[in-house]
Image (cartoon, grey):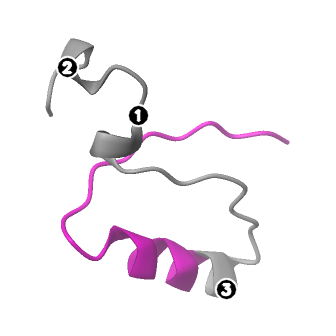
C-alpha cells in the first residue's frame, strides 16, 4: 500500500516522523521542509 501524506508539524517534525517510523514499522522515503519545496512562494502556508 502506498500512502502520500502531507502533515504540518512544528520544529521537531523530523524527530516525530522518525519516532513513528521506528514504532509503527514504516519507511520514510522522503521528507522536506516548507522552504525546501519547489516554488514555496506559490504554496499557501497552513
Name the main secondary structure of what is drawn in magenta.
loop
Q: Which of marks 3 and 2 is in front?
A: 2
Q: Is residue 11 found left or right of 27 in the rendered image?
A: left
State the quadrant of the C terminus. top left
Q: Label 1 belongs to which residue?
A: 37
Q: Residue 29 falls in which quadrant of the image?
A: bottom right
**Total residue callouts:** 3
Q: 1 or 46: nearer the eye?
A: 46
Separation of disc 3 and disc 2 at Cα? 33 Å
Q: Residue 44 falls in which quadrant of the image?
A: top left
Badge 3 local density, few (<14 within 10 Å), some, or many (20+)?
Answer: few
Q: Is residue 23 found left or right of 10 in the rendered image?
A: right
Q: Give the range drawn in magenta.
A: 1-20
At horizontal 68% and vertical 62% (from top left) the residue drawn is 28
* Above or below: residue 31 compared with residue 18: above
Q: Is residue 31 found left or right of 40 in the rendered image?
A: right
Amino acid at each position: 500500500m502506498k500512502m502520500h501524506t502531507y502533515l504540518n508539524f512544528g520544529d521537531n517534525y523530523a524527530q516525530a516522523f522518525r519516532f513513528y517510523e521506528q514504532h509503527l514499522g514504516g519507511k520514510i522515503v522522503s521528507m522536506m521542509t516548507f522552504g525546501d519545496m519547489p516554488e514555496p512562494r506559490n504554496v499557501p502556508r497552513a
